[in-house]
């Protein structure tokens, strides 16, 4: 993304198609070739499409779970492959973020030290333990859903809701740094985060039913809010790693609650 666009490239202009392409480029490793030049400021404008990226990521991983389950593979094998696919599609972007936050918040004594550790490419004990717990919780939550067919809408809904949370994190939380992702992307327009919220609410309700979706969404929002509060106390706001942590925490909470509700027979 250079400041001077090649003559053959079009300049970014906000539109649903352009914003979805920017969001996909930013949040996934899906190989897209687009004839468009844009800066990090476009990421803030594209926040309205973050939940739609979740629809793509969740649709691919949830579809894989569903297909493999139909083939008769053990349910926890299906769940492991589904989670692995999400990590592959996103390039472990969010997992890397929550690992950095765990190392920074756990190992730093001051704000500056925490931010320094979060930028360090080395992986510490806090990160390793956090990632193990996070991945295990996802796999066991998906694998324990009954009937197994309910895992598909739950995976998609969790992916949608957790990325909608990222849009609101960008809007509500100040940047903890003067540089970096949180600062360069900027604060999304209000209407963008409102659109993201609509997708975040409507898609899970349509897929899971109002009761299960509402309970999972509430838990997802509460956990993200708690993560945001911790980040504000630790470093005074958000960074790209904090935003990725919001996604992970809210997605895990969503899946855990959905697994409990579906296993207890609540699906509407």
Image (cartoon, rainbow, N blue to C red):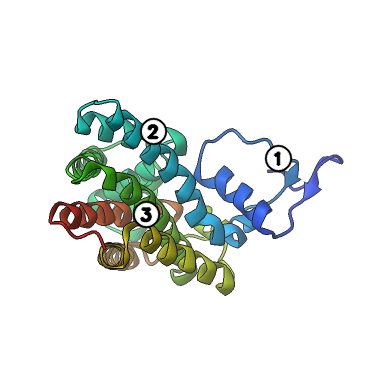
> How far, Cα to Cα, is label 1 from label 3?
28 Å
Q: Position of residue 109 (x, y in %)?
A: 25, 56
The alpha-carbon separation of the residues under discs 3 and 2 comes to: 16 Å
Which residue sits furthest bottom? 190
Horizontal relation, residue 35 to residue 197: left or right: right
Question: Where 66 falls versus 249 (above or below)?
Answer: above
Residue at far right of view: 7
- x and y, in percent, of residue 141 in the image: 20, 45
Q: Which residue is mark 1?
A: 34
**Quarter of the view holding residue 88:** top left
Disc on the earlier residue, 1 or 3: 1
Which residue is located at x 45 percent, y 53 percent? 240
Q: Quadrant of the C terminus?
A: bottom left
Task: Quickly name the residue at label 3.
Answer: 157
- Secondary structure of the residue carrying tag 2 is helix
**Near-viewer residue (189 or 105):** 189
User: 10 Å neighbourhood of mark 3: few (<14), some, or many (≥20)?
Assistant: many
Q: Is residue 155 left or right of residue 49?
A: left
Secondary element under disc 1, as helix, strand or loop, is loop
Q: Nearer the viewer, residue 133 or 20?
A: 20
Say left or right for 55 vs 77: right
The Cα–Cα distance between marks 2 and 1, rounded to whole angstroms, is: 24 Å
Name the residue tied to disc 2: 85
Q: Position of residue 168 (x, y in %)?
A: 45, 66
Regarding residue 22, the answer to whether it shows in the image is yes
Q: Residue at x 45, y 50 (%)?
A: 54
The residue sitting at the left extreme is: 264
Do tag 3 and tag 2 residues touch (Cβ < 8 Å)? no
């Amino acid at each position: 993304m250079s400041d001077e666009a090649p003559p053959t490239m079009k300049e970014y202009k906000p539109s649903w198609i352009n914003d979805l392409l920017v969001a996909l480029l930013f949040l996934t490793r899906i190989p897209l070739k687009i004839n468009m030049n844009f800066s990090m400021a476009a990421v803030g404008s594209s926040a309205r499409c973050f939940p739609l990226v979740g629809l793509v990521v969740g649709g691919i991983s949830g579809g894989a779970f569903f297909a493999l389950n139909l083939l008769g593979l053990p349910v926890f094998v299906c769940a492991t492959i589904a989670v692995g696919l999400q990590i592959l599609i996103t390039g472990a972007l969010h997992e890397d973020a929550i690992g950095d936050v765990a190392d920074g918040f756990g190992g730093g004594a001051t704000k500056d030290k925490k931010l320094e550790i979060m930028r360090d490419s080395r992986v510490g004990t806090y990160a390793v333990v956090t990632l193990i717990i996070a991945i295990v919780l996802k796999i066991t939550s998906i694998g324990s859903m009954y009937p197994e067919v309910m895992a598909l809408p739950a995976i998609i809904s969790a992916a949608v809701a957790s990325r909608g949370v990222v849009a609101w994190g960008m809007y509500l939380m100040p940047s903890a740094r003067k540089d970096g992702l949180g600062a360069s992307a900027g604060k999304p327009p209000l209407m963008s985060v409102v659109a993201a919220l609509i997708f975040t609410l409507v898609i899970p309700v349509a897929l899971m039913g109002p009761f299960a979706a509402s309970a999972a969404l509430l838990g997802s929002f509460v956990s993200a809010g708690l993560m945001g509060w911790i980040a504000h106390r630790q470093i005074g706001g958000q960074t790209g790693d904090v935003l990725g942590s919001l996604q992970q925490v809210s997605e895990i909470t969503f899946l855990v609650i959905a697994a409990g509700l579906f296993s207890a027979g609540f699906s509407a």
